[in-house]
Image (cartoon, grey):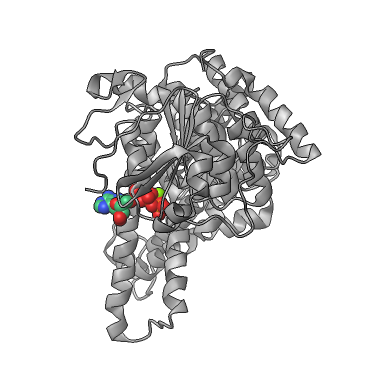
Protein backbone atom coordinates (compact mmCIF):
# COMPACT_ATOMS: atom_id res chain seq x y z
CA UNK A 1 0.00 0.00 0.00
CA UNK A 2 1.69 3.13 -1.21
CA UNK A 3 -0.77 5.60 0.31
CA UNK A 4 -2.14 5.67 3.82
CA UNK A 5 -4.81 7.69 5.50
CA UNK A 6 -4.84 10.58 3.06
CA UNK A 7 -7.67 13.00 3.45
CA UNK A 8 -7.95 16.48 2.03
CA UNK A 9 -10.47 18.58 0.22
CA UNK A 10 -9.86 21.15 -2.45
CA UNK A 11 -12.10 24.10 -3.14
CA UNK A 12 -13.23 25.11 -6.58
CA UNK A 13 -10.75 27.49 -8.18
CA UNK A 14 -7.92 26.60 -5.84
CA UNK A 15 -4.47 25.73 -7.15
CA UNK A 16 -2.80 23.11 -5.07
CA UNK A 17 0.78 21.93 -5.34
CA UNK A 18 1.54 18.42 -4.25
CA UNK A 19 5.21 18.17 -3.44
CA UNK A 20 7.34 15.47 -1.96
CA UNK A 21 10.44 13.39 -2.56
CA UNK A 22 10.77 10.64 -5.19
CA UNK A 23 8.63 7.65 -4.42
CA UNK A 24 6.43 9.55 -1.97
CA UNK A 25 3.32 8.36 -3.78
CA UNK A 26 2.45 11.51 -5.70
CA UNK A 27 1.82 9.82 -9.03
CA UNK A 28 -0.12 7.11 -7.25
CA UNK A 29 -2.31 9.72 -5.61
CA UNK A 30 -3.14 11.24 -8.98
CA UNK A 31 -4.35 7.88 -10.23
CA UNK A 32 -6.98 7.95 -7.50
CA UNK A 33 -8.34 11.30 -8.57
CA UNK A 34 -10.07 9.93 -11.65
CA UNK A 35 -10.75 6.47 -10.39
CA UNK A 36 -7.98 4.53 -12.12
CA UNK A 37 -7.03 3.26 -8.69
CA UNK A 38 -9.53 2.95 -5.85
CA UNK A 39 -8.57 3.04 -2.25
CA UNK A 40 -10.72 2.11 0.68
CA UNK A 41 -12.06 5.47 1.71
CA UNK A 42 -14.61 7.47 -0.25
CA UNK A 43 -13.52 9.99 -2.86
CA UNK A 44 -15.85 12.77 -3.90
CA UNK A 45 -15.28 14.96 -6.91
CA UNK A 46 -17.59 17.96 -7.19
CA UNK A 47 -19.86 16.24 -4.74
CA UNK A 48 -20.06 13.13 -6.90
CA UNK A 49 -18.96 9.98 -5.13
CA UNK A 50 -16.34 8.20 -7.18
CA UNK A 51 -17.87 4.91 -8.27
CA UNK A 52 -18.53 2.91 -11.42
CA UNK A 53 -21.67 4.89 -12.23
CA UNK A 54 -20.00 8.29 -12.08
CA UNK A 55 -16.68 7.34 -13.62
CA UNK A 56 -17.48 8.68 -17.06
CA UNK A 57 -18.60 12.06 -15.75
CA UNK A 58 -15.62 12.32 -13.41
CA UNK A 59 -13.08 11.47 -16.07
CA UNK A 60 -14.50 14.24 -18.19
CA UNK A 61 -14.22 16.73 -15.36
CA UNK A 62 -10.82 15.68 -14.11
CA UNK A 63 -8.17 16.04 -16.81
CA UNK A 64 -4.94 14.28 -15.96
CA UNK A 65 -1.69 15.08 -17.74
CA UNK A 66 0.70 12.24 -16.97
CA UNK A 67 4.37 12.46 -16.17
CA UNK A 68 5.67 10.84 -19.36
CA UNK A 69 4.23 12.39 -22.53
CA UNK A 70 5.03 9.23 -24.48
CA UNK A 71 2.35 7.51 -22.44
CA UNK A 72 -0.18 10.17 -23.22
CA UNK A 73 0.44 10.64 -26.93
CA UNK A 74 -0.31 7.29 -28.43
CA UNK A 75 -1.69 8.20 -31.84
CA UNK A 76 0.44 8.89 -34.85
CA UNK A 77 -0.33 12.53 -35.50
CA UNK A 78 -0.65 15.49 -33.15
CA UNK A 79 -4.13 16.45 -34.34
CA UNK A 80 -5.45 12.92 -33.97
CA UNK A 81 -4.16 12.71 -30.46
CA UNK A 82 -5.61 16.01 -29.33
CA UNK A 83 -8.91 15.03 -30.95
CA UNK A 84 -9.02 11.74 -29.05
CA UNK A 85 -10.50 13.10 -25.81
CA UNK A 86 -13.14 15.34 -27.41
CA UNK A 87 -14.22 12.56 -29.76
CA UNK A 88 -14.65 10.24 -26.79
CA UNK A 89 -16.98 12.88 -25.40
CA UNK A 90 -19.15 12.43 -28.46
CA UNK A 91 -18.69 15.92 -29.88
CA UNK A 92 -19.42 16.71 -33.50
CA UNK A 93 -16.63 16.92 -36.04
CA UNK A 94 -16.52 20.73 -36.36
CA UNK A 95 -16.58 21.08 -32.59
CA UNK A 96 -13.70 18.64 -32.27
CA UNK A 97 -11.66 20.50 -34.87
CA UNK A 98 -12.33 23.78 -33.13
CA UNK A 99 -11.18 22.38 -29.80
CA UNK A 100 -8.05 20.89 -31.31
CA UNK A 101 -7.15 24.24 -32.82
CA UNK A 102 -7.78 26.12 -29.58
CA UNK A 103 -5.98 23.69 -27.34
CA UNK A 104 -2.91 23.65 -29.55
CA UNK A 105 -2.93 27.43 -29.74
CA UNK A 106 -3.17 27.55 -25.96
CA UNK A 107 0.09 25.65 -25.55
CA UNK A 108 1.80 27.50 -28.38
CA UNK A 109 1.79 24.55 -30.74
CA UNK A 110 -0.39 25.82 -33.57
CA UNK A 111 0.83 24.56 -36.88
CA UNK A 112 1.94 21.24 -35.45
CA UNK A 113 -1.37 19.55 -36.29
CA UNK A 114 -0.02 17.18 -38.90
CA UNK A 115 3.32 16.42 -37.31
CA UNK A 116 4.13 12.89 -36.22
CA UNK A 117 4.03 12.62 -32.45
CA UNK A 118 7.10 10.43 -32.19
CA UNK A 119 9.30 13.02 -33.86
CA UNK A 120 8.51 15.88 -31.51
CA UNK A 121 11.10 16.98 -29.00
CA UNK A 122 10.44 16.18 -25.37
CA UNK A 123 9.26 19.67 -24.51
CA UNK A 124 6.98 19.74 -27.53
CA UNK A 125 5.52 16.40 -26.54
CA UNK A 126 4.94 17.74 -23.06
CA UNK A 127 3.02 20.71 -24.41
CA UNK A 128 0.96 18.61 -26.78
CA UNK A 129 0.18 16.24 -23.91
CA UNK A 130 -1.16 19.22 -21.98
CA UNK A 131 -3.21 20.23 -25.02
CA UNK A 132 -4.78 16.76 -25.26
CA UNK A 133 -6.30 17.37 -21.85
CA UNK A 134 -7.11 21.07 -22.31
CA UNK A 135 -9.18 20.09 -25.35
CA UNK A 136 -11.58 18.28 -23.04
CA UNK A 137 -12.29 21.48 -21.08
CA UNK A 138 -11.74 19.83 -17.72
CA UNK A 139 -12.99 21.43 -14.51
CA UNK A 140 -9.96 20.19 -12.63
CA UNK A 141 -6.60 20.06 -14.30
CA UNK A 142 -4.22 17.56 -12.78
CA UNK A 143 -0.60 17.77 -13.88
CA UNK A 144 2.21 15.40 -13.01
CA UNK A 145 5.49 17.28 -13.20
CA UNK A 146 4.48 19.63 -16.00
CA UNK A 147 7.83 21.43 -16.16
CA UNK A 148 10.30 18.57 -15.87
CA UNK A 149 12.83 18.50 -18.73
CA UNK A 150 11.59 21.70 -20.29
CA UNK A 151 14.00 24.37 -21.44
CA UNK A 152 13.67 27.69 -19.58
CA UNK A 153 11.60 29.34 -22.28
CA UNK A 154 9.22 26.41 -22.67
CA UNK A 155 8.98 26.21 -18.89
CA UNK A 156 8.16 29.89 -18.66
CA UNK A 157 5.53 29.59 -21.39
CA UNK A 158 3.88 26.59 -19.81
CA UNK A 159 3.81 28.30 -16.42
CA UNK A 160 2.18 31.34 -17.94
CA UNK A 161 -0.39 29.25 -19.72
CA UNK A 162 -1.23 27.20 -16.68
CA UNK A 163 -1.20 30.08 -14.23
CA UNK A 164 -3.83 31.82 -16.30
CA UNK A 165 -6.13 28.89 -16.82
CA UNK A 166 -9.14 29.65 -14.68
CA UNK A 167 -9.73 26.09 -13.56
CA UNK A 168 -9.00 24.19 -10.39
CA UNK A 169 -5.46 22.89 -10.57
CA UNK A 170 -3.59 20.13 -8.84
CA UNK A 171 0.06 20.16 -9.73
CA UNK A 172 2.60 17.57 -8.74
CA UNK A 173 6.09 18.95 -8.97
CA UNK A 174 9.62 18.95 -7.66
CA UNK A 175 10.05 22.42 -9.02
CA UNK A 176 9.28 24.49 -5.93
CA UNK A 177 9.50 27.88 -7.63
CA UNK A 178 6.90 26.64 -10.08
CA UNK A 179 4.73 25.47 -7.24
CA UNK A 180 5.10 28.87 -5.63
CA UNK A 181 4.21 30.71 -8.79
CA UNK A 182 1.20 28.68 -9.77
CA UNK A 183 -0.37 27.58 -6.54
CA UNK A 184 -1.80 29.11 -3.41
CA UNK A 185 -1.71 25.96 -1.33
CA UNK A 186 0.78 23.18 -0.88
CA UNK A 187 0.46 19.63 0.32
CA UNK A 188 3.62 17.79 1.22
CA UNK A 189 3.40 14.08 0.67
CA UNK A 190 5.98 11.87 2.27
CA UNK A 191 6.06 8.09 2.42
CA UNK A 192 2.42 7.91 1.45
CA UNK A 193 1.22 10.32 4.11
CA UNK A 194 0.40 14.00 4.26
CA UNK A 195 3.22 15.74 6.10
CA UNK A 196 1.92 19.26 5.70
CA UNK A 197 -1.00 21.10 4.17
CA UNK A 198 -1.28 24.85 4.13
CA UNK A 199 -0.82 28.16 2.30
CA UNK A 200 2.13 27.85 0.01
CA UNK A 201 4.09 30.76 1.50
CA UNK A 202 3.95 29.14 4.90
CA UNK A 203 4.89 25.67 3.72
CA UNK A 204 7.76 26.84 1.54
CA UNK A 205 9.24 29.14 4.16
CA UNK A 206 9.26 26.48 6.86
CA UNK A 207 12.88 25.42 6.57
CA UNK A 208 12.66 22.59 9.07
CA UNK A 209 9.56 21.14 7.46
CA UNK A 210 11.17 21.13 4.02
CA UNK A 211 14.33 19.57 5.31
CA UNK A 212 12.47 16.88 7.21
CA UNK A 213 10.82 15.89 3.95
CA UNK A 214 13.93 15.93 1.72
CA UNK A 215 12.85 19.10 -0.04
CA UNK A 216 14.88 22.21 -0.69
CA UNK A 217 14.35 25.53 -2.38
CA UNK A 218 16.86 26.12 -5.19
CA UNK A 219 19.93 28.11 -4.24
CA UNK A 220 19.24 31.82 -4.34
CA UNK A 221 15.50 31.48 -4.54
CA UNK A 222 13.79 33.38 -1.80
CA UNK A 223 10.14 33.84 -1.19
CA UNK A 224 9.46 37.56 -1.10
CA UNK A 225 7.80 38.80 2.05
CA UNK A 226 4.21 39.91 1.65
CA UNK A 227 3.37 43.56 1.16
CA UNK A 228 6.05 44.69 -1.29
CA UNK A 229 4.50 46.86 -3.99
CA UNK A 230 4.39 45.16 -7.37
CA UNK A 231 4.38 41.76 -5.79
CA UNK A 232 0.71 41.42 -5.33
CA UNK A 233 -0.42 38.29 -3.63
CA UNK A 234 -3.20 37.50 -6.04
CA UNK A 235 -1.41 37.54 -9.36
CA UNK A 236 1.57 35.25 -9.22
CA UNK A 237 2.97 35.98 -12.64
CA UNK A 238 4.99 38.85 -11.34
CA UNK A 239 8.45 38.79 -12.73
CA UNK A 240 7.56 38.69 -16.38
CA UNK A 241 9.63 40.55 -18.89
CA UNK A 242 7.96 42.77 -21.42
CA UNK A 243 7.64 40.27 -24.26
CA UNK A 244 6.73 37.46 -21.93
CA UNK A 245 3.79 39.58 -20.95
CA UNK A 246 2.76 39.98 -24.57
CA UNK A 247 2.95 36.26 -24.97
CA UNK A 248 0.86 35.87 -21.91
CA UNK A 249 -1.99 38.01 -23.14
CA UNK A 250 -1.90 36.21 -26.43
CA UNK A 251 -2.28 32.90 -24.68
CA UNK A 252 -4.98 34.22 -22.48
CA UNK A 253 -6.84 35.39 -25.57
CA UNK A 254 -6.53 31.89 -26.98
CA UNK A 255 -7.85 30.47 -23.79
CA UNK A 256 -10.97 32.48 -23.28
CA UNK A 257 -12.91 29.78 -25.03
CA UNK A 258 -11.41 27.14 -22.86
CA UNK A 259 -13.23 28.48 -19.88
CA UNK A 260 -16.13 26.13 -20.13
CA UNK A 261 -17.77 27.00 -16.87
CA UNK A 262 -18.35 30.60 -15.82
CA UNK A 263 -18.56 29.54 -12.20
CA UNK A 264 -14.87 28.81 -12.11
CA UNK B 1 16.79 0.51 -41.18
CA UNK B 2 13.82 0.84 -38.85
CA UNK B 3 14.46 4.49 -38.27
CA UNK B 4 14.36 5.11 -42.00
CA UNK B 5 10.74 4.00 -42.01
CA UNK B 6 10.01 6.01 -38.93
CA UNK B 7 11.37 9.35 -39.92
CA UNK B 8 9.15 11.90 -41.46
CA UNK B 9 9.79 11.53 -45.15
CA UNK B 10 9.48 14.70 -47.03
CA UNK B 11 6.55 14.15 -49.30
CA UNK B 12 7.25 16.01 -52.51
CA UNK B 13 4.00 17.44 -53.78
CA UNK B 14 2.45 15.59 -56.69
CA UNK B 15 -0.90 14.44 -58.02
CA UNK B 16 -0.64 11.05 -56.31
CA UNK B 17 0.06 12.67 -52.94
CA UNK B 18 -3.21 14.55 -53.14
CA UNK B 19 -5.38 11.50 -53.72
CA UNK B 20 -7.62 10.03 -51.05
CA UNK B 21 -5.61 7.24 -49.38
CA UNK B 22 -8.45 4.80 -50.05
CA UNK B 23 -8.01 5.13 -53.81
CA UNK B 24 -4.29 4.48 -53.52
CA UNK B 25 -4.73 1.54 -51.18
CA UNK B 26 -7.35 -0.20 -53.34
CA UNK B 27 -5.65 0.71 -56.60
CA UNK B 28 -2.13 -0.38 -55.74
CA UNK B 29 -3.16 -3.52 -53.87
CA UNK B 30 -5.42 -4.63 -56.75
CA UNK B 31 -2.63 -3.83 -59.16
CA UNK B 32 -0.28 -6.05 -57.17
CA UNK B 33 -2.82 -8.87 -57.09
CA UNK B 34 -3.25 -8.68 -60.87
CA UNK B 35 0.53 -8.70 -61.34
CA UNK B 36 0.96 -11.73 -59.09
CA UNK B 37 -1.75 -13.66 -60.91
CA UNK B 38 -0.19 -13.08 -64.35
CA UNK B 39 1.40 -16.16 -65.95
CA UNK B 40 5.16 -15.82 -65.83
CA UNK B 41 5.72 -16.56 -69.51
CA UNK B 42 3.97 -13.42 -70.70
CA UNK B 43 7.12 -11.36 -70.50
CA UNK B 44 5.88 -8.33 -72.46
CA UNK B 45 2.99 -7.99 -69.99
CA UNK B 46 5.47 -7.47 -67.21
CA UNK B 47 7.12 -4.79 -69.29
CA UNK B 48 3.79 -2.98 -69.42
CA UNK B 49 3.34 -3.33 -65.66
CA UNK B 50 6.83 -1.98 -65.09
CA UNK B 51 6.05 0.95 -67.37
CA UNK B 52 2.91 1.73 -65.37
CA UNK B 53 4.79 1.67 -62.06
CA UNK B 54 7.64 3.75 -63.46
CA UNK B 55 5.15 6.27 -64.80
CA UNK B 56 3.45 6.57 -61.41
CA UNK B 57 6.78 6.93 -59.61
CA UNK B 58 7.77 9.66 -62.03
CA UNK B 59 4.40 11.33 -61.61
CA UNK B 60 4.81 11.52 -57.85
CA UNK B 61 8.37 12.88 -58.23
CA UNK B 62 10.01 10.37 -55.93
CA UNK B 63 13.77 10.30 -56.05
CA UNK B 64 15.07 7.30 -57.98
CA UNK B 65 17.84 6.57 -55.50
CA UNK B 66 15.40 6.58 -52.62
CA UNK B 67 13.03 4.18 -54.37
CA UNK B 68 15.83 1.81 -55.37
CA UNK B 69 17.30 1.80 -51.90
CA UNK B 70 14.01 0.82 -50.38
CA UNK B 71 13.39 -1.74 -53.12
CA UNK B 72 16.51 -3.60 -52.00
CA UNK B 73 14.40 -5.46 -49.45
CA UNK B 74 13.49 -7.99 -52.15
CA UNK B 75 17.11 -8.99 -52.71
CA UNK B 76 17.49 -11.51 -49.85
CA UNK B 77 14.17 -13.02 -50.76
CA UNK B 78 15.15 -13.57 -54.39
CA UNK B 79 18.55 -14.94 -53.36
CA UNK B 80 16.89 -17.56 -51.16
CA UNK B 81 14.73 -18.61 -54.09
CA UNK B 82 17.78 -18.75 -56.34
CA UNK B 83 19.62 -21.02 -53.89
CA UNK B 84 16.78 -23.51 -53.75
CA UNK B 85 16.06 -23.37 -57.46
CA UNK B 86 17.94 -26.51 -58.52
CA UNK B 87 15.63 -28.49 -56.27
CA UNK B 88 12.53 -26.83 -57.68
CA UNK B 89 13.52 -27.16 -61.27
CA UNK B 90 14.28 -30.83 -61.28
CA UNK B 91 11.22 -32.17 -59.61
CA UNK B 92 8.86 -29.55 -61.01
CA UNK B 93 6.53 -30.32 -63.85
CA UNK B 94 7.95 -27.47 -65.94
CA UNK B 95 9.01 -29.81 -68.71
CA UNK B 96 11.86 -27.62 -69.92
CA UNK B 97 14.53 -29.63 -68.22
CA UNK B 98 17.75 -29.78 -70.19
CA UNK B 99 18.79 -33.03 -68.56
CA UNK B 100 22.44 -32.64 -67.54
CA UNK B 101 22.14 -28.89 -66.99
CA UNK B 102 22.09 -28.03 -63.33
CA UNK B 103 19.60 -25.23 -63.76
CA UNK B 104 16.61 -26.10 -65.84
CA UNK B 105 14.73 -23.61 -67.94
CA UNK B 106 11.74 -24.30 -65.74
CA UNK B 107 13.80 -23.27 -62.76
CA UNK B 108 14.84 -20.06 -64.48
CA UNK B 109 11.22 -19.34 -65.20
CA UNK B 110 10.45 -19.76 -61.50
CA UNK B 111 13.22 -17.32 -60.66
CA UNK B 112 11.93 -14.80 -63.19
CA UNK B 113 8.41 -15.30 -61.92
CA UNK B 114 9.33 -14.68 -58.29
CA UNK B 115 11.80 -11.90 -59.00
CA UNK B 116 9.64 -9.87 -61.36
CA UNK B 117 6.53 -10.14 -59.25
CA UNK B 118 8.36 -9.36 -56.03
CA UNK B 119 9.98 -6.25 -57.43
CA UNK B 120 6.74 -4.98 -58.97
CA UNK B 121 4.84 -5.65 -55.75
CA UNK B 122 7.46 -3.94 -53.65
CA UNK B 123 7.59 -0.94 -55.95
CA UNK B 124 3.81 -0.56 -55.73
CA UNK B 125 3.96 -0.63 -51.95
CA UNK B 126 6.82 1.87 -51.89
CA UNK B 127 4.70 4.07 -54.10
CA UNK B 128 1.80 3.78 -51.68
CA UNK B 129 3.91 4.38 -48.58
CA UNK B 130 5.89 7.29 -49.99
CA UNK B 131 2.91 9.24 -51.25
CA UNK B 132 0.73 8.74 -48.18
CA UNK B 133 1.62 9.97 -44.68
CA UNK B 134 1.22 7.12 -42.23
CA UNK B 135 -1.68 8.56 -40.21
CA UNK B 136 -3.62 9.18 -43.44
CA UNK B 137 -2.98 5.64 -44.54
CA UNK B 138 -4.32 4.27 -41.27
CA UNK B 139 -7.37 6.49 -41.54
CA UNK B 140 -7.81 5.18 -45.09
CA UNK B 141 -7.73 1.58 -43.93
CA UNK B 142 -10.19 2.43 -41.19
CA UNK B 143 -12.57 3.98 -43.71
CA UNK B 144 -12.28 0.86 -45.81
CA UNK B 145 -13.80 -0.96 -42.84
CA UNK B 146 -10.66 -2.77 -41.85
CA UNK B 147 -11.45 -3.83 -38.26
CA UNK B 148 -10.39 -1.23 -35.75
CA UNK B 149 -8.29 -3.72 -33.80
CA UNK B 150 -5.97 -4.31 -36.76
CA UNK B 151 -5.62 -0.65 -37.56
CA UNK B 152 -4.87 0.14 -33.92
CA UNK B 153 -2.29 -2.61 -33.62
CA UNK B 154 -0.47 -1.26 -36.65
CA UNK B 155 -0.82 2.27 -35.36
CA UNK B 156 0.64 1.37 -31.97
CA UNK B 157 3.45 -0.56 -33.60
CA UNK B 158 4.34 2.44 -35.69
CA UNK B 159 4.09 4.88 -32.82
CA UNK B 160 5.99 2.85 -30.24
CA UNK B 161 8.59 0.96 -32.24
CA UNK B 162 10.48 4.22 -32.10
CA UNK B 163 10.13 4.54 -28.35
CA UNK B 164 11.23 0.94 -27.84
CA UNK B 165 14.17 1.24 -30.22
CA UNK B 166 15.24 4.27 -28.22
CA UNK B 167 14.73 2.43 -24.94
CA UNK B 168 16.84 -0.48 -26.17
CA UNK B 169 19.54 1.89 -27.33
CA UNK B 170 19.59 3.57 -23.92
CA UNK B 171 19.90 0.24 -22.14
CA UNK B 172 22.70 -0.82 -24.46
CA UNK B 173 24.50 2.39 -23.67
CA UNK B 174 23.93 1.98 -19.96
CA UNK B 175 25.37 -1.50 -20.13
CA UNK B 176 28.33 -0.40 -22.24
CA UNK B 177 29.00 2.56 -19.98
CA UNK B 178 29.62 0.12 -17.18
CA UNK B 179 32.22 -1.64 -19.28
CA UNK B 180 30.23 -4.58 -20.45
CA UNK B 181 31.37 -6.19 -23.68
CA UNK B 182 29.06 -8.92 -24.87
CA UNK B 183 31.83 -10.99 -26.37
CA UNK B 184 31.89 -14.19 -24.42
CA UNK B 185 29.47 -17.00 -24.04
CA UNK B 186 28.96 -16.34 -20.34
CA UNK B 187 27.80 -12.84 -21.22
CA UNK B 188 24.71 -14.22 -22.89
CA UNK B 189 22.60 -14.30 -19.70
CA UNK B 190 23.17 -10.56 -19.29
CA UNK B 191 21.93 -9.88 -22.80
CA UNK B 192 18.98 -12.09 -22.00
CA UNK B 193 18.29 -9.96 -18.96
CA UNK B 194 18.47 -6.79 -21.05
CA UNK B 195 15.83 -8.23 -23.36
CA UNK B 196 13.75 -9.39 -20.41
CA UNK B 197 13.89 -5.96 -18.94
CA UNK B 198 12.91 -4.45 -22.28
CA UNK B 199 9.89 -6.72 -22.26
CA UNK B 200 8.90 -5.68 -18.75
CA UNK B 201 9.35 -2.03 -19.59
CA UNK B 202 7.22 -2.42 -22.68
CA UNK B 203 4.61 -4.16 -20.63
CA UNK B 204 4.34 -1.46 -18.01
CA UNK B 205 4.52 1.15 -20.75
CA UNK B 206 1.47 -0.53 -22.26
CA UNK B 207 -0.28 -0.33 -18.92
CA UNK B 208 0.50 3.35 -18.52
CA UNK B 209 -0.69 4.12 -22.04
CA UNK B 210 -3.95 2.35 -21.34
CA UNK B 211 -4.40 4.30 -18.12
CA UNK B 212 -3.79 7.55 -19.99
CA UNK B 213 -6.31 6.48 -22.62
CA UNK B 214 -9.11 5.68 -20.21
CA UNK B 215 -8.36 8.92 -18.38
CA UNK B 216 -9.41 10.67 -21.54
CA UNK B 217 -12.64 8.73 -21.73
CA UNK B 218 -11.60 5.85 -23.97
CA UNK B 219 -14.42 3.34 -24.28
CA UNK B 220 -13.24 1.01 -26.98
CA UNK B 221 -13.42 3.05 -30.15
CA UNK B 222 -11.12 5.58 -31.71
CA UNK B 223 -12.13 7.86 -34.53
CA UNK B 224 -9.22 8.49 -36.85
CA UNK B 225 -10.31 11.36 -38.96
CA UNK B 226 -8.84 12.52 -42.20
CA UNK B 227 -10.29 15.18 -44.41
CA UNK B 228 -9.98 13.16 -47.63
CA UNK B 229 -12.87 12.81 -50.05
CA UNK B 230 -13.40 10.34 -52.84
CA UNK B 231 -13.82 12.53 -55.93
CA UNK B 232 -13.26 12.51 -59.68
CA UNK B 233 -9.47 12.30 -59.55
CA UNK B 234 -9.69 9.27 -57.25
CA UNK B 235 -12.16 7.57 -59.60
CA UNK B 236 -9.94 8.39 -62.56
CA UNK B 237 -6.80 7.04 -60.90
CA UNK B 238 -8.49 3.88 -59.71
CA UNK B 239 -10.34 3.26 -62.98
CA UNK B 240 -7.31 3.77 -65.20
CA UNK B 241 -4.91 1.76 -63.08
CA UNK B 242 -7.16 -1.25 -62.70
CA UNK B 243 -8.43 -1.09 -66.29
CA UNK B 244 -4.91 -1.08 -67.76
CA UNK B 245 -3.71 -3.87 -65.47
CA UNK B 246 -6.73 -6.09 -66.05
CA UNK B 247 -6.81 -5.49 -69.79
CA UNK B 248 -3.17 -6.43 -70.22
CA UNK B 249 -3.61 -9.36 -67.91
CA UNK B 250 -6.57 -10.71 -69.90
CA UNK B 251 -4.77 -10.33 -73.23
CA UNK B 252 -1.83 -12.22 -71.73
CA UNK B 253 -3.85 -15.27 -70.83
CA UNK B 254 -5.67 -15.77 -74.16
N1 LIG C 1 2.74 -0.69 -9.98
C1 LIG C 1 3.38 -0.60 -8.81
N2 LIG C 1 3.53 -1.69 -8.04
C2 LIG C 1 4.17 -1.62 -6.86
N3 LIG C 1 4.70 -0.50 -6.37
C3 LIG C 1 4.59 0.60 -7.08
C4 LIG C 1 3.94 0.62 -8.35
N4 LIG C 1 3.99 1.87 -8.84
C5 LIG C 1 4.65 2.59 -7.91
N5 LIG C 1 5.02 1.84 -6.87
C6 LIG C 1 5.73 2.28 -5.65
O1 LIG C 1 4.91 3.19 -4.96
C7 LIG C 1 5.68 4.25 -4.43
C8 LIG C 1 5.11 5.58 -4.90
O2 LIG C 1 5.33 5.72 -6.29
P1 LIG C 1 4.92 7.02 -7.09
O3 LIG C 1 5.16 6.75 -8.53
O4 LIG C 1 3.57 7.44 -6.69
O5 LIG C 1 6.00 8.07 -6.56
P2 LIG C 1 6.15 9.62 -6.90
O6 LIG C 1 5.88 10.35 -5.65
O7 LIG C 1 5.34 9.96 -8.08
O8 LIG C 1 7.70 9.72 -7.22
P3 LIG C 1 8.47 10.59 -8.36
O9 LIG C 1 8.70 11.92 -7.76
O10 LIG C 1 9.77 9.86 -8.48
O11 LIG C 1 7.65 10.58 -9.58
C9 LIG C 1 7.10 4.02 -4.89
O12 LIG C 1 7.81 3.48 -3.80
C10 LIG C 1 6.99 3.02 -6.00
O13 LIG C 1 8.11 2.20 -6.02
MG1 LIG D 1 5.75 10.49 -10.07
User: x and y percent of residue A262 in the render?
Assistant: 54, 12
User: x and y percent of residue B7 in the render?
Assistant: 58, 51
In this rendering, position of residue B17 left or right of residue A57: right
- A141 vs A215, nearest the viewer: A215
Q: Is residue A15 above or below residue B173?
A: above
Q: Is residue B47 visible?
A: no
Q: Is residue A165 above or below residue B110?
A: above
User: How many numbered marks appear?
Assistant: 0
- A127 vs B102, nearest the viewer: A127
Residue furthest to the left: A40
User: x and y percent of residue A191 in the render?
Assistant: 31, 52
Q: Residue at point 39% right, 66% down?
A: B80
- B68 vs B96, nearest the viewer: B68
Q: Is residue A263 visible?
A: yes
In this rendering, position of residue A70 left or right of residue A45: right
Q: Residue at point 61% right, 39% down?
A: A159
Residue furthest to the bottom: B184
- A208 vs B219, nearest the viewer: A208
Q: Residue at point 58% right, 23% down?
A: B227
Quarter-wise, where is residue A18 in the image?
top left
Name the quarter where the C terminus of chain B is drawn.
Answer: top left
User: x and y percent of residue A126 in the render?
Assistant: 54, 43
Amino acid sequence: MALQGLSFSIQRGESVAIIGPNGAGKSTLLLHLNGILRGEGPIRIFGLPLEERTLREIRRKVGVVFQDPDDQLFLTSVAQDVAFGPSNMGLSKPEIEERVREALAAVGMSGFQDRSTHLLSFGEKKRVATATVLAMWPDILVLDEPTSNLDPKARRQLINILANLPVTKIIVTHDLPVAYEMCNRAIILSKGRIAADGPIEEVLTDQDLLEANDLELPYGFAIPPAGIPGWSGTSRTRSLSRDAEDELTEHVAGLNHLVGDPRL
Amino acid sequence: MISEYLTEKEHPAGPLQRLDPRAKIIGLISFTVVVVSTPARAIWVFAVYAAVVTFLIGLSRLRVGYVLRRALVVVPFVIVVAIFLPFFGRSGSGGYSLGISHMSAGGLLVLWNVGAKAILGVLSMILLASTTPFPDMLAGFRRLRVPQVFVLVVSFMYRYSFVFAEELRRMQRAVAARNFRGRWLWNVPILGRVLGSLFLRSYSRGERIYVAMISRGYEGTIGLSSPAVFGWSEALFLGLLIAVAVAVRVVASV
